[in-house]
Amino acid sequence: LPGVSAGASYTLTDLDMEGEADTTIHQFQAKIETDYLLHGSNILTFGVDEVLQMSNIYEKFGGWVPMESLGHEILYNEYTMDTDGNRIVHSSAYALWSFGTEKSTLRGELGIRGEHYYLWNDGYDFNTVPVVNPRLSLNWTPIRNAGLFEAITISAGSGIFSQFPLIL
């Protein structure tokens, strides 16, 4: 534009820029779980979990834009988007063996979890391959009620965790 220098700032009276954006995320979850007491402090837990997540995106921006293709005119330009975002269903099933109590010298968990994701939107879908994730956690408490300490516990655990990006 004539008279405009790179890196300079200018105030144009009554030429405001405005905008708004809103992303709404809805999430619904259902879970069914049951415990079965084997004997003593050994418990088997089984469950299924389902999560549905949906999003809606609304954006509106407007402002004065130099349109060089029209001979250096400054025109008001408005952009509006109102669309559904991705829909994702996350399904999982799991089994867990827990043993020991808070007073046990050794307690822990051994489990496995299967997970699956399905994503869809207008014109496309994405179906993942189900994955299996193991986990193990152990807590060893060799010392109890010794002087200043109520208990000294050493913990170790390992597992695999899978996650799918929910907002793309």
Image (cartoon, rainbow, N blue to C red):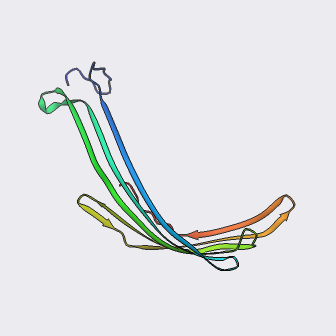
Residue at 35%, 52% (x, y): give it. 55
Farthest residue to the top: give it: 13
On screen, 159 above or below 71? below
Q: Is residue 4 found left or right of 164 in the rendered image?
A: left
Extreme residue toward the right, this view: 147
User: How many numbered markers are drawn?
Assistant: 0
Is residue 131 positioned above or below 63 on the image? below
Q: Quadrant of residue 17?
A: top left
Q: Is residue 70 left or right of residue 162?
A: left
Q: Position of residue 100 (x, y in %)?
A: 70, 74
Q: How far from the left and from the top, in percent, is residue 27?
A: 42, 55
Q: Tell me what residue is drawn at x 62 percent, y 69 percent.
A: 157
- Which quarter of the image is occupied by the N terminus? top left
Rendered-image quadrant of the C terminus: bottom left
Which residue: 68% across, 67% down? 155
128 horizontally vs 112: left or right: left
User: Looking at the image, which is closer to me, 165 or 25?
Assistant: 25
**Of all residues shown, which one is farthest toward the bottom?**
39
Across and down, in percent, residue 164 comes to 41, 62
